[in-house]
Image: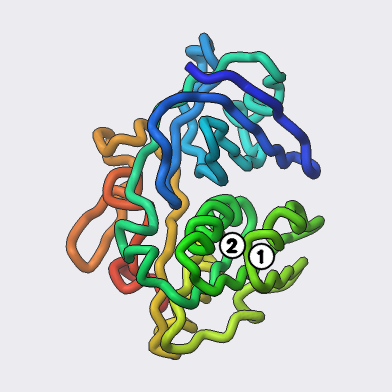
Amino acid sequence: MALIIDNKKLAEGIFLMRVSSNIQAPRPGQFVMLRPEGDGLFLARPISVMDWENGVWTFLYKVVGKGTDAFSRLESGDDIFMFGPMGNGFGRVLPLEKTRKAVLIGGGMGIAPMYGLAKALKKTGAHVKIHLGFTDEPILRKEFSEVAEELVINVGGYVTDDVRFEPGTVYFACGPDPMMRAAARKAREAGAELIVSLESRMACGMGACLGCNIDTANGSKRVCKDGPCFRYEEVTGLGE
C-alpha cells in the first residue's frame, strides 16, 4: 500500500501524482503497477516512474480509460495499491556511468522516464540534452530544464526532426510508435547508439501472462520482464 501525497492536473487529461511508499527504490527506466486501493474492478496499470527521492515517487499519466480515470479522482491522503519497481531499466542495456554525452527524446507520456534518466546521468557528470515533443500545450518545461544543459521543445510537429544523430553520443527514446520508428531510422543511418524504452499494454507486469511479447533478434521477449529498455537493433522491425 502507498499513500497519495498530491495528484495535480497539469493539462486536459494529464496528471502528475506523487506517492509516498517505502518499497525498494527504482532504477531509471523501471515502472510500477498501480491500482486504486480496494478497487477490484480494474487491473493494475503499468506506470513509468518519473522521479523518486527519499521515498516519494512521482508519476505522470494521461487519462485514457476507466483505470486512469479512477487515478485522476484520487486525492491527498487516499491509499493506492503499488507493486514494483518492475522491469529492467536503461542501465541494464548500458551502464549509465559510461555515458559521457547523452541526448534524451521523449514524446507524449514518454517524457516521464526521461526525467529520472536525466537526473541519474547528470550525477555521473554526463552532458545531457533533452528533446520533448507535445501535441498541444507543453508541460513540465521548468522541471526538465533543471536536469539538462539544453532543452528543446517541439509542439505539434515531429520531435525527431529536431534531433541530429551522430556517432559518439548515446540516444535514449520513449514515446509513440511513429516517433520511435523515426528515431531508430535516423540512428541506423547515422551509425549512432540508441536505447529505447517501449510502451506496451500489460496485464500482470511480471511476465506471466505473455500479453506484452514482442519479436526481437534473440527471439520472443516480454516488454515487462525483459524490457522495457532495449537497444533499438534488438527490436524486430524498428528502424526499417
Report whether 163 appears left or right of 125.
right
Marks 1/2 in contact by CB < 8 Å: the verdict is: yes
Q: Residue at x 80, y 42 (%)?
A: 12
Residue at screen point 71% across, 22% down: 73
Image coords of residue 15 (percent x, y): 70, 38
For residue 175, which quarter of the picture? bottom right
* SS class, disc 2: strand
Seen from the viewer's position, the closer of residues 192 and 209 is 192
Q: Where's residue 221, x and y in %?
A: 25, 53
Q: Is residue 61 left or right of residue 116?
A: right
Q: Residues within 10 Å of mark 2 (few under 14, many from 20)?
A: many
Identify the residue position indicated by label 2 in the image.
106
Relative to residue 156, is residue 169 depicted above or below? below
56 relative to 226 in the view: left or right: right
Q: Residue at x 30, y 35 (%)?
A: 206
- Residue 173 image position (x, y, % from top left): 50, 65
Other-residue count near label 1 (Cα within 10 Å), few / some / many at <14 / 14–19 / ≥20: many
Q: Secondary structure at mark 1?
A: strand
Give the amino acid type for the residue marked by disc 1 in the picture. Leu
Q: In the image, which disc is placed on residue 60?
A: none
Residue displayed at 58% across by 50% down: 112
Q: x and y percent of residue 34 in the render?
A: 50, 28
